[in-house]
Image (cartoon, coloured by chain):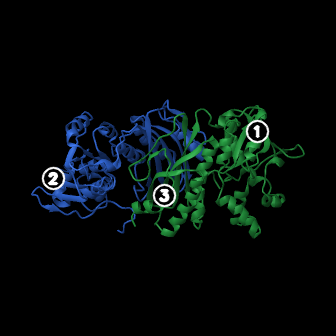
Chain colours: A blue, B green
Amino acid sequence: VNEFDLIRTYFAAQSLARPDVQIGIGDDAAIVRPPPGTETVITTDVLVEGVHFFPDVDPAALGHKSLAVNLSDLAAMGAAPAWFLLNLTLPEPKASWLQALAKGMFALACEHQMQLIGGDTSRGPLAIGITAIGLVPDGTRLLRSGARPGDAICVTGALGDAALALAARRGKLSLRAEEIAAANERLDRPVPRVRAGMQLRDLASSAIDVSDGLLADLGHVLEASAVGARLTLQTIPLSSVYRAHLATIGWGYALAGGDDYELCVTIPRDNLERAKRSTEQNNLSLHVIGEIVPGHGIEIFDGAGQRYQPAGKGYNHFAAG
Amino acid sequence: VNEFDLIRTYFAAQSLARPDVQIGIGDDAAIVRPPPGTETVITTDVLVEGVHFFPDVDPAALGHKSLAVNLSDLAAMGAAPAWFLLNLTLPEPKASWLQALAKGMFALACEHQMQLIGGDTSRGPLAIGITAIGLVPDGTRLLRSGARPGDAICVTGALGDAALALAARRGKLSLRAEEIAAANERLDRPVPRVRAGMQLRDLASSAIDVSDGLLADLGHVLEASAVGARLTLQTIPLSSVYRAHLATIGWGYALAGGDDYELCVTIPRDNLERAKRSTEQNNLSLHVIGEIVPGHGIEIFDGAGQRYQPAGKGYNHFAAG
């Protein structure tokens, strides 16, 4: 099997053919034509074996997740997904493994009408790089820099389950089999909040996706917007699994665990009810967890009005330990 | 040093700011606005340590080459470079190494008015993935599929030097110090034929860049165009270093060595003189090496009119041996 056959066999088999793709896989480069009146939104992320996933990862889940983390970035800009490119580096090609990877990836791609338009395959340590491209109507994109004092801070779903699954896998806490299954689903198959991002485009003042942990990612919004935040600990949404163990594990995984891929958005008070209704139409709840305030940094208060001091601030690939 | 600081320090320092970039590095994704009347051309390639470069590679050369191989793909479409994204996976960040990498990359980027708009940094085995995006006026892009019988087959410069450098490095042949330096320059710092690609946009019937070896890449053009080719061995351009060793090394490196990053274009006879003049304005010679013929496959004839049978057909990452 040579690398061209590889790409053709497993990744050129996608049935979707968007009318805005002039040239897809098979030439020196792809050619697309973004529709008039749109801005083009581009993001790229790599998942590396041993860093972002375990060597025994389910290839279908890996295919899903490697695209999902990029879709999550498009969602945070309010963009509609359009095209993607895949860079696959692997020690040796195995048909069944590649088939499963492609299946997991294309299931998510097709759900979002996203066409694979190019890529590269190489021998090397296992890593999957994806470049995802989306579209927003001119001037409607969500940025990190729009948060203003008084805006509600909201998240689109429960936080901390992915970190919980990872901790259980590493033997740091003990969960029942069905709890592990539920938490693993959040770790392995995150659901990018693409529709919510598009729905909130005209209602939110800023957005980011929670990939490095709530405090770290909200911190980026605060920095870009030159504002501060006040959070109420008990309003941070938790899954039933997380809540069942809250007394022993504390809030750390929810605040700083990362890999959640929920959106964290700020919403002017006047838009809040409309924003809640529009995400609910999409079976997603918008949870208000705090408020933007003048100043800088994040203050967290517990139910009794006491300051809560978190231990960590987010996941960092190069941090010691 | 954390990964965000890393990216900011060494890669957000590019001074270029294109007016068509709405949001560059620093949000969840970049936002660009391709000008009206253009098509958007997108390519991506990864260079992996131990596969595409040696562990002791000069980081400035690596920075240059990782962008150059992508620019070469844009050149083969006739596209003007515009933006790029960088995925850097590395075992640990070292300031001096990253500085040199960024310097080599940005020197080439600035030469082509190309702005870095995003990327990702991760711990892992050393690999550099780049997604490069260019623009062509509507309907003017060069494809692999346009070659027609009678068209001249041309290349933009000498072939085989990169493979020669690699062979010398592996001890397969012995070169003098200044010969090694000249050949290494072609291997380490390939010059993507961007301007030639743009100049040939209205004159060539097809184009591809020679990355896997002339025979393999011309083969892709023939397949896409459903035609054959007849080459004259002695017309294939060689460097003076290559020519000095031709008697002992033969034509293999030039025909199938790869890593050349010259363009291989087919040009209708009526356009040939104009094509030669326009590339010469750019200090680049267009060498006619053969002709497109009906049928399929490649026939090579030597100066005496005898059929020449090449040994290999191009570089393949997954081929045995």
Q: Indicate which disc residue A277 carries.
A: none
Depth check, mark 1 against mark 3: the one in front is 1
Characterize the local packing of mark 1: few (<14), some (14-19) or many (20 or more) Cα atoms within 10 angstroms: few
Q: Indicate which disc residue B274 carries.
A: 1
Query: A291 or B230, which lies in front?
Result: A291
Q: Where does label 3 land, which residue?
A: B88
Q: What chain does mark 1 sit on?
A: B
Q: What chain does mark 2 sit on?
A: A
Q: Which residue in the rendered view is the most extreme toward the top? A: A19
Q: Looking at numbered disc 3 in the image, what kind of residue is underneath it?
A: Leu
Separation of marks 1 and 2 at Cα, in angstroms = 73 Å
Characterize the local packing of mark 2: few (<14), some (14-19) or many (20 or more) Cα atoms within 10 angstroms: few
Q: Is residue B141 left or right of residue A287?
A: right
Q: Earlier in the sequence, mark 1 or mark 3?
A: 3
Separation of marks 1 and 3 at Cα, in angstroms = 42 Å
Q: Is residue B214 left or right of residue B25?
A: right
Please provide percent x and percent y for residue A16: 47, 32
- Element under disc 2: helix
Separation of marks 3 and 2 at Cα, in angstroms = 38 Å
Q: Indicate which disc residue A234 carries.
A: 2
